[in-house]
Image: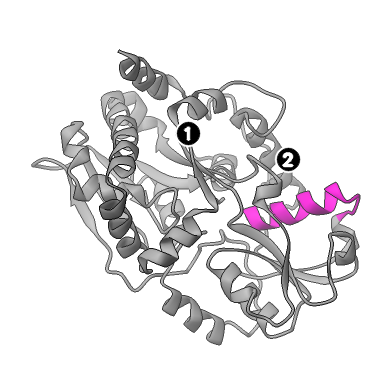
Amino acid sequence: MKNAMRLRSLFTYIALFVVGLTLTVSCTNPAANISTDSAPVSSSAGSGESIASLGFSAWPGWIPWQVAQERNIFEIHKASVDLKWFDGYLESINTLAAQQITANSQTLNDTVSSVSGGADQVVVLVNDNSTGNDKIIARSGINSIADLKGKKIAAEAGTVDHFLLLLGLEKEGLSPEDIQFVPLETGQAAAAFIGGQVDAVGVFAPFTTQALKRPGSKEIFSSKDFPGAIPDHLVVTRKLIDEHPEQVQALVDSWFATLDYIETNAQSAIAIMAKRAGVSVAEYEEYAEGTHIFSIEENLKAFQPGTDRISLAFAAQEMSEFLNKVGLAKQKPDLSKLFDDRFIKAYAAKAQK
C-alpha cells in the first residue's frame, strides 16, 4: 500500500490547509510537495561508499526503515545501504526514475506510472496495504455513494485516492461523468473541502482527520472496503538487481528482521517511528491502524498470479488500465518483468530452517 496515511507533521499540514485554499490543478502523487518539520537524514551501514541507496518518506508502511537504521539492522544483514529520507514523496519517485537512487518505497500506482514512462523498475517486496487510511469524505446531507451523483468531489488526479473514488462509483453503478471531479493536490483538496468549496474529498491520513473536522462531515467509504487496491512496495532499479542481487537480498532480509524487532520491542520502535514521522506516539498509533503490514506468507501469496487484487499482477493490470483511462499514461506498460519474488522466496527458505 498508493499509496496505503502518508504521515507528515500535523503542524505542517495545518499550514498547508491555510495556504492551500486557492484551487489549483495538479496530477502528482498524494504526498507530493508535502514536507515534515524533521530534518532529512542520510545514513550508511558499514564503512566506505554504500552500494545501494534507499529512499523512503512518511507512510507507516515505510517508516520501519528508520528502525532498521537506528538499530543497526542493515549492518547486521550486510546491507551496504545509504538510507535517504524525502520530505516530498514525489521527489523520491522522480529521484528513483532518474536512477539517482537505486531503491525506493512507493505505491503500485506510481511504479506502474513510472514504468509506463520508460523506467525499468522492479517490485521485490510488499510492505503493506492501505486498510482504511485512504477515505472518501463528504459533507452533511451526503450519506451514501449514490448521494455523490452530481456533486463536486476533489481528489488528486491519477492518484490512489482518485482510483479509490472511481472504484466506489463503479460499485454503485455510477461513472466518472456522474460527478463533478475537481482535480487538486491532496492538501489543497482537503482545504477546499474544509472551506466548503466542494461537497466531498478523497484524501489520506492525516488529511482525513482534518477533513472530518468540517461540521457534519462523514466517511462514505475507504480503502478498507477495497482490499488490495492500494499496496505499497520496495521498488528497485533493474541495474541494482543485475549488478548487486546480494544487496537486494540484504534489503529484503533487513526488512523482515526489522518487523521482528518491532514485534518484540514495540515501545521503543514506535517511539523511533513517531519521531521520524513528526507526530506524537499516540497519533502514530492511531494512524497505523489503517495500514496492514505484510508478513512473509502474505508476500509470497501476493506475488502469485490471481484474479483479484490479492495478486499484484492483477492489481498492476487494473492500475495500468486506470492510468491509461484517465490520460496519465500515454501507453500501457510492459508488466511482464515488473515483479521479482526470488528475494522473498530466499528469505522464506532461510526462515524455515
Q: Residue at x 62, y 57 (%)?
A: 134
Q: Which residues are magenta?
A: 159-175
Please state which of residues 332 and 311 is positioned toward the viewer in this rendering. 311
Q: Give above or below for 324 relative to 189.
A: above
Q: Earlier in the sequence, mark 1 or mark 2?
A: 1
Q: Give above or below for 13 relative to 45.
A: below
On-image quarter of the N terminus:
top right
Quarter where residue 11 is shown: bottom left
Q: In this orientation, does residue 262 appear?
A: yes
Q: In this orientation, does residue 90 appear?
A: no
Is 80 left or right of 101, judged from the image as shown? left
Please state which of residues 116 and 309 is positioned toward the viewer in this rendering. 309
Q: Nearer the viewer, mark 1 or mark 2?
A: 1
Residue 190, percent from left and from top: 63, 74
Is there a contact, CB below 8 Å, between mark 1 and mark 2?
no
- Residue 165 colored in magenta in the image: yes
Point out the residue furthest to the left here.
47
Q: Which label belongs to residue 219?
A: none
Q: What's the distance in space between the residues labelled 1 and 2, CA to CA?
A: 19 Å
Q: Give above or below for 160 relative to 346.
A: below
Quarter where residue 158 is shown: bottom right
Mark 1 residue element: strand
Instruction: Classify 10 Å Cα crowding around label 1: few (below 14), some (14-19), many (20 and above).
Output: many
The residue where tag 2 is placed is 321
Residue 27, percent from left and from top: 63, 62
The residue where tag 1 is placed is 123
- Three-letter amino acid code of the residue under disc 1: Val
Residue 329, percent from left and from top: 66, 47
- Three-letter amino acid code of the residue under disc 2: Glu
